[in-house]
Amino acid sequence: MTRTGSTLLITAILAAGAAGCGSIGSRAGSPDPSPSASADRQQLLALGQEWVKCMRDKGMTRMPDAQLTPDGYLTFPMADGYDWKGDLRNHPGVIEACKPIEDRYPPNAFRPKDEITADDLRKLAEYAKCVRQNGIPEFPDPNKDGEFDLEGTSLENGIPQAKIDVADQACKHIWDGRIKVISPDGGKK
């Protein structure tokens, strides 16, 4: 075999081997899609950070870093008590300015909104009743989305943590899932 022939053969073998190695592009026929899924999630995280940078550049300097949940969804969790969603009210043009980045998110970027079943609503209503019986008599019933709206109630400015702890301890046997609260100072929590 000539030197040129062996070079072509090695190049062909390397090209075939590289085609089987995980690239960011399509991996149709690959028996193990997890490296591609991981790469896609890393791309999603990079896109999230690009959006965060835009938000910060437009005045939301405390915007938290983008993160991936353990199951691979993009999230921007509150940090140090900073409610960035509530702060958006003070920066009305930011969302529109960063929308071109947001428009590039794939459909599966965020965890699907939890569906509230009739049974969940029944349990949440029982939980609210229990909370009222255990030190927070003004606690509202849940709305149709399973959220507790504190706006316009005596609780809208906050509930002392000690009262929350007592009520939660007494009522967690009824509902131990996430409690969604709407308050005027920070939107949904």
Image (tube, rainbow, N blue to C red):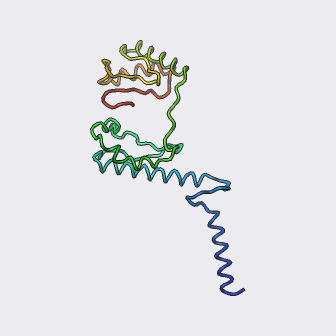
Q: Nearer the viewer, residue 8 or 65?
A: 8
- Residue occupying the far right of the picture: 1
Q: Nearer the viewer, residue 71 or 145?
A: 145
Q: Position of residue 66 (x, y in %)?
A: 41, 47
Q: Quadrant of the C terminus?
A: top left
Q: Where is residue 10 drawn, in percent x and y?
A: 66, 77
Q: Residue furthest bottom?
A: 2
* Left or right: residue 95 compared with residue 147: left
Q: Quadrant of the N terminus?
A: bottom right
**Camera-side residue of 152 and 69:** 152
Tell me the quarter of the picture where residue 60 sits.
top left
How many numbered badges does the structure rendering display?
Answer: 0
**Does residue 181 appear to the left or right of 116 in the view shown?**
left
Q: Is residue 54 above or below residue 168?
A: below
Residue at 41% across, 12% down: 133
Q: Position of residue 120 (x, y in %)?
A: 53, 22
Q: Is residue 8 left or right of residue 158?
A: right
Nearest the viewer among 84 and 96 is 96
Residue 21 % position (x, y): 62, 62
Q: Is residue 180 above or below residue 130?
A: below
Residue lying at 68% horizontally and 56% vertically, measured from the top left: 29
Q: Residue at x 57, y 58 (%)?
A: 25
Q: Quadrant of residue 87?
A: top left
